[in-house]
Amino acid sequence: MSEHDSPPAGLQVQLQTLLLSTADVTSFLQQLAVLSTQVVTSEGLSCGITMRCDGNVTTVASSDERAERLDETQYRNHGGPCLEATDTGQQVISQDCQTDPRWPPYMARALREGLRCSLSLPLTAAGTTFGAINVYEFDKPHFFGETEQRRYHLFAVQAAGALRLATRQHKDSVLLSQLEAALNSRSVIDQAIGILIGRHQLTGAEAFDLLRRQSQNSHRKLREIATDLVTDASGAPPTPGNPFDTD
């Protein structure tokens, strides 16, 4: 494979930078859609990114409204290249929308939008296809030759891996936030238990049971009861727990 068959080296660097610098998955997907229009040179390219979520397919990002409308038309009519790529895990190409007999309801709308040809590539990682990159060309038919197809194939492989890492990082950050919240809650409760032990000469178990009963009787969360107790006793909000160190 020659260097001409690969996506531009600068594009690969941009993809890596995007993965490292983007704070959330939504922003990552939106910038990935725009980046997908730069794999090859053309003024008429648009891109939509389809993903399967809870058994349904949806466009999670698009470079412009045309791509989003074409994606949505396929979902409404239960047929089209991006759906086929997602379902089969195989590349789907339409070299000339004016003569392609597949998916008539979708093709009718595509022609009204001015679409000339398209390329849909599956997003597959760890053996599972979870979506597709849909590239739409509005300038001329037969745009996606062998070189363009190979470049997009390699880009889709790289994008799928980056997207898998991005979603994993997002899940990890959510989990970390949940763990820190649990730690802070435990810290507040422990401070309240300490106050009750000193105030009423209780054991730790007796102090916790007292907090629990107050929570049940007042229909408030245990942490809220503990926070009020600590604040009233010290005149200041509870001290939060130490954050998790991820470095």
Image (cartoon, grey):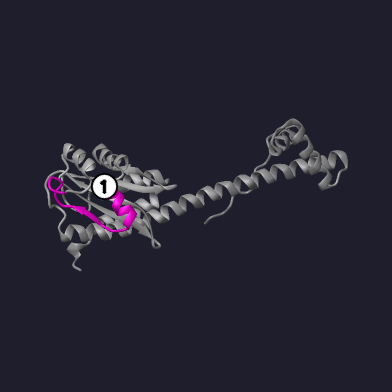
Can residue 104 be seen at all in this image of the molecule?
yes
- Please indicate whether residue 125 sits to the left or right of residue 153 in the image: right
- Viewer-proximal residue, 107 or 150? 107
Is residue 243 covered in magenta?
no
- Please indicate whether residue 231 sits to the left or right of residue 32 in the image: right
Q: Which residue is mark 1?
A: 80
Image quarter (top left, top right, bottom left or bottom right) of the N terminus: bottom left
State the extent of the magenta-drawn residues as a range.
81-100
Q: Quadrant of residue 112?
A: top left
Q: Residue at x 32, y 46 (%)?
A: 31
Query: How far from the left and from the top, in percent, is residue 135?
Result: 23, 49
Q: Amino acid under label 1?
A: Gly
Query: How far from the left and from the top, in percent, is residue 85?
Result: 29, 54
- Viewer-proximal residue, 65 or 241? 65
- Please indicate whether residue 232 sits to the left or right of residue 178 in the image: right
Query: How far from the left and from the top, in percent, is residue 65?
Result: 26, 37
- Viewer-proximal residue, 220 or 108? 108
Can residue 22 be seen at all in this image of the molecule?
no
Query: How far from the left and from the top, in percent, is residue 212?
Result: 77, 40
Q: Residue at x 69, y 45 (%)?
A: 187
